[in-house]
Image: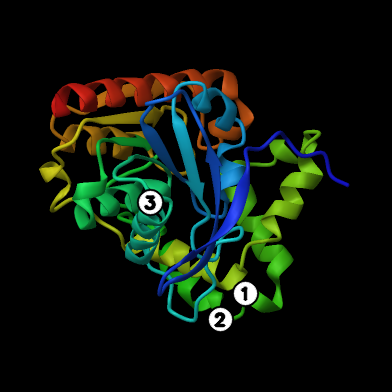
């Protein structure tokens, strides 16, 4: 059996008219606000957030969803779309009986969080956006890479192990392979549907919130990973500059810092979530 980290309770949840997903739910202090954790591309809720669950739940209620085709997320014949993921997240919020949340989006989870605010503003008290951007795939090499992913998704089921390994190396790097959690990490990656994951990459490359992100009207914090090898730091900074009164918190790490260096990432994440929750509470008051 692989060595797995301590994880909060999780369960499969049927979202009416959408499908069955999987969510982790951890209770925080009485009356605490709720964070909705939205993971990055090729990961799952557990892979992205396992370092963060326990420290976050000391101050907040925590809900974390597996997105479509990732982990134990919804399996559907519909082409992957980030908008569907945002609507799934909204359906989960309602299904577990919450009136509002603070979405916390990492990488691909950033666009999903932005779309959740745009499509379901009544559910969003604030935003915490980590290692993400308002658009992707703007340079010629990026466009070529993201465009190729849709074509590759049709043959992904023929080489699922190679697809998973290449995508994971791209996002998380190889350092995780030397850790005691390596076998657990590898088995978690095997839960992904390779074809859908590649479609997700193509969707990320087509995403842009540049035309409307300036309308965000809730407290926002942007965690900028200053050594990022996947989402350029300047893209992250431009995201923050586009959102009125967004707070910027710099994290000295690369795109995998949430997994490989929790000592740097978790305090910054707690800081960002606490600032947003405080401002959201004052806004309501």
Task: Name the residue nearer the viewer: 243 or 4.
Answer: 4
User: How would you rate the neighbour count of disc 2 (Cα within 10 Å): few for under 14, some for 14-19, many for 20 or more?
Assistant: some
The image quadrant that residue 232 belongs to is: top left
> To which residue does mark 2 refer?
154
Q: Is mark 2 in CB contact (under 8 Å) with mark 1?
A: yes
Please determine whether, in this image, residue 213 is positioned above or below residue 208. above
Q: Residue at x 63, y 42 (%)?
A: 9
Please determine whether, in this image, residue 234 is positioned above or below residue 69. above
Q: Is residue 153 left or right of residue 233?
A: right
> To which residue does mark 1 refer?
156
Please determine whether, in this image, residue 66 is positioned above or below residue 174. below
User: How would you rate the neighbour count of disc 1 (Cα within 10 Å): few for under 14, some for 14-19, many for 20 or more?
Assistant: many
Q: Earlier in the sequence, mark 3 or mark 2?
A: 3
> To which residue does mark 3 refer?
93
The picture places residue 275, in percent across and down from the top left corner, at 30, 20
The picture places residue 270, in percent across and down from the top left corner, at 43, 22
Task: Confirm whether residue 76 shows in the render.
Answer: yes
Please determine whether, in this image, residue 11 is positioned above or below residue 198. above
The image quadrant that residue 32 belongs to is: top left
The picture places residue 227, in percent across and down from the top left corner, at 47, 29
């Amino acid at each position: 059996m692989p060595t797995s980290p301590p994880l909060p309770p999780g369960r499969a949840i049927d979202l009416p008219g959408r499908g069955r997903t999987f969510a982790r739910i951890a209770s925080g202090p009485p009356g605490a606000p709720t964070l909705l954790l939205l993971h990055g591309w090729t990961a799952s809720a557990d892979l992205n957030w396992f370092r963060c669950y326990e420290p976050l739940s000391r101050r907040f209620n925590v809900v974390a969803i597996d997105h479509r085709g990732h982990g134990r997320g919804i399996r559907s014949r519909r082409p992957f779309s980030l908008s569907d993921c945002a609507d799934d997240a909204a359906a989960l919020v309602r299904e577990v009986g919450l009136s509002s949340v603070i979405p916390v989006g990492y990488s691909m989870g950033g666009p999903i969080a932005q779309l959740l605010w745009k499509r379901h503003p009544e559910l969003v008290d604030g935003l915490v956006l980590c290692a993400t951007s308002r658009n992707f795939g703007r340079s010629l090499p990026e466009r070529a890479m993201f465009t190729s992913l849709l074509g590759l998704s049709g043959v992904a089921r023929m080489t699922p192990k190679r697809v998973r390994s290449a995508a994971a190396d791209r996002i998380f790097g190889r350092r995780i392979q030397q850790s005691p959690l390596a076998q657990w990490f590898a088995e978690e990656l095997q839960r992904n549907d390779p074809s859908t994951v590649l479609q997700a990459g193509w969707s990320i490359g087509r995403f842009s919130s540049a035309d409307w992100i300036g309308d965000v009207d809730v407290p926002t914090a942007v965690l900028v990973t200053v050594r990022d090898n996947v989402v350029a730091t300047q893209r992250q900074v431009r995201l923050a500059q586009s959102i009125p009164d967004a707070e910027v918190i710099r994290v000295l790490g690369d795109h995998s810092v949430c997994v490989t260096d929790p000592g740097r990432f978790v305090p910054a994440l707690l800081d960002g979530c606490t600032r947003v929750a405080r401002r959201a509470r004052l806004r309501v008051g």
